[in-house]
Image (cartoon, rainbow, N blue to C red):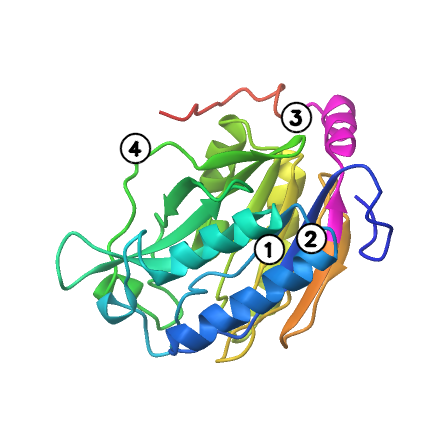
Amino acid sequence: MTAPDEAASTAGVRVTVAQVEVSRDHAANRDAVTAVVREAAEAGADLVALPEYASGYERRGVGPAHAEPLDGPFVTLLRSLAAEHGLAVVAGMTLPGRSPQRAVNAVVAVGADGEVAGVYRKVHLYDAFGSRESDTLEPGPLDARPLTFAVGGLTFGVLTCYDLRFPESARRAVDAGAQALLVPAAWVAGPLKADHWRTLLRARAIENTAAVVGVGMAGHGTTGRSLVAGPDGVVTLELGDGPQTATVTLDPAAITRTRAANPSLANRRYTTAPR
């Protein structure tokens, strides 16, 4: 891992962490995404990571009213920006569900060519700490393969917010080839919540010998505090709770070295391969 202020020429994959504040106004959110992607391009980023629900959010709950299809205005914008600037973009959004009463909490990955590289549908809905996502959302299928995609010399895997509390979500992505984990989130604030967020991100890095990029949402009672940890759990970037962007370099060679020194993945006695 390298510090966020090192030169863009440093070998590795440049990732811009875009901790934006998201509102219920979808057009305003698209304007915010456009601004941060342009900022990332100026910083020499290879990948821009946006939070969960980046297309539209409100604290009382997100459901079908915020849903739009993959050929709707949000993903269309992501594809246009990715192709224009030659970088990948990952962002949370809300897709239509199988019935009009339900939507899907999803993360879409768009490659630098402007094509959709994949979609992850959140498996673990946030029915905890007084919230009930399952009232308006349907979970992603348990038998879906993990979303992984390559940027530069690094393979990324995706999980979302509450998934972070379930180690098997991260492990399935790593077993599918991920060397780095992206965790878009709208991590709701509350007692010990910021501590849980930080601890869990570091734990997923250490136990999987993978870099972890946690991208929090700012505002609206969310925690923010985006964090990047190396495969040894060392934190190399940590933001506050307000809107902010920062660019870091992830070094694939550092992950390879960590996995050679600490072959815990190879030494497992219990394994669960992705189906």
Horizontally, residue 254 falls left or right of residue 219, namely: right
Q: Which residue is mark 1?
A: 214
Numbered disc in front, either 3 or 2: 2
Q: Residue at x 67, y 63 (%)?
A: 39
Q: Quadrant of the C terminus?
A: top left
* Residues packed near mark 3 inside 10 Å, few (<14), some (14 to 19) or many (20 plus): some
Q: Which residue is mark 4?
A: 143
Amino acid on which the number 1 mark rests in the picture: Gly
Q: Which residues are magenta?
A: 248-264
Q: Secondary structure at mark 1?
A: strand
N-terminal of the two: label 3 or label 4?
Answer: 4
Q: Residue at x 33, y 63 (%)?
A: 127
Numbered disc in front, either 1 or 3: 1
N-terminal of the two: label 1 or label 4?
Answer: 4
Q: Which sits in the foreground, 63 or 172?
A: 63
Can you say whether 139 is above or below 112 in the image?
below
Q: Position of residue 191 (x, y in %)?
A: 54, 75
* Residue 264, numbered circle: 3
Q: Position of residue 233 (x, y in %)?
A: 72, 45
N-terminal of the two: label 3 or label 2?
Answer: 2
Could you tell me how far apart the alpha carbons at marks 4 and 2 are, in whole angstroms?
Answer: 29 Å
Residue 64 is covered by the magenta coloring: no
Q: Which residue is mark 2?
A: 228
Q: Secondary structure at mark 4?
A: loop
Horizontally, residue 231 falls left or right of residue 213, namely: right
Horizontally, residue 257 falls left or right of residue 76, namely: right
Numbered disc in front, either 3 or 4: 4
Q: Are marks 3 and 4 in contact (CB under 8 Å)?
A: no
Amino acid on which the number 4 mark rests in the picture: Asp
Q: Are marks 1 and 2 in contact (CB under 8 Å)?
A: yes
